[in-house]
């Protein structure tokens, strides 16, 4: 059985992006993302994949969800829907990495959430993460970090597990 994990960085309003770009550049968040996802499977929407500066992320299985069956990307597999993609991941750790519509579909399937909660509000945002409802999700751990010379705002790494 595979484990489905959503990983995302959200601000105080659950904003995740603007014009297909991340809202914040936090080096420790990017390091955490790489550490957690390397060697595992990533599932993402087409726009998220196209926002990656160098295409498919190395040392990971990259799966792209798109209704366009004619799409083809180097080092990525295309599936027409989330269910089909997840079914292809037997006994794998699967990280859902965005964007907004994929997160909304996946939140009902996920076993865990690995969130970076940014203690700020972006001026401009056009993509949002679904509300994390406490009756469905239990906070498992929280690691708080202050702003510093490399991180313009404070943030927390927060892990949630699904309540049974």
Image: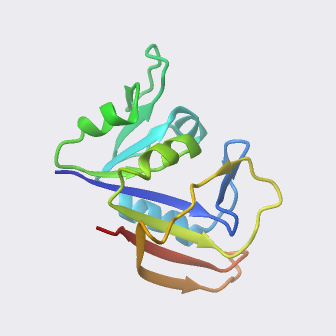
**Residue 126 percent location from the top left of the image:** 73, 47
Q: Position of residue 96 (x, y in %)?
A: 42, 49
Q: Residue furthest right?
A: 123
Question: Which quadrant, please, contains the C terminus?
Answer: bottom left
Q: Is residue 61 above or below residue 115?
A: above
Residue 113 is situated, as x and y percent measured from the top left of the image, at 42, 64
Q: Is residue 89 left or right of residue 126?
A: left
The quadrant in which residue 89 appears is top left
Which image quarter: residue 32?
bottom left
Q: Residue at x 55, y 41 (%)?
A: 101
Q: Residue at x 56, y 78 (%)?
A: 156
Which residue sits furthest front? 135
Nearer to us in this view, 106 or 35: 106
Q: Could you tell me if residue 163 is visible in this image? A: yes
Q: Would you say 65 lies left or right of 54 here?
A: left
Can residue 38 be seen in this snapshot?
A: no
Residue 4's image quarter?
bottom left
């Amino acid at each position: 059985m595979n484990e489905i994990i959503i990983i995302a960085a959200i601000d105080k309003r659950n904003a995740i992006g603007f014009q297909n770009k991340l809202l914040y550049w936090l080096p420790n968040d990017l390091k955490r993302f790489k550490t957690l996802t390397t060697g595992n499977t990533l599932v993402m929407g087409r726009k998220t994949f196209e926002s990656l500066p160098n295409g498919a992320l190395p040392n990971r299985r990259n799966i792209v969800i798109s209704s366009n069956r004619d799409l083809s990307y180097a080092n990525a597999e295309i599936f027409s829907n989330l269910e089909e993609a997840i079914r292809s991941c037997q006994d794998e750790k699967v990280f859902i990495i965005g964007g907004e519509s994929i997160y909304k579909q996946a939140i009902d399937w996920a076993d865990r959430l690995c969130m970076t909660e940014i203690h700020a509000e972006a001026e401009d945002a056009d993509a949002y993460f679904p509300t994390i409802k406490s009756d469905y999700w239990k906070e498992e751990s929280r690691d708080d970090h202050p702003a510093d010379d490399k991180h313009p705002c404070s943030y927390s790494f927060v892990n949630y597990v699904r309540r049974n």
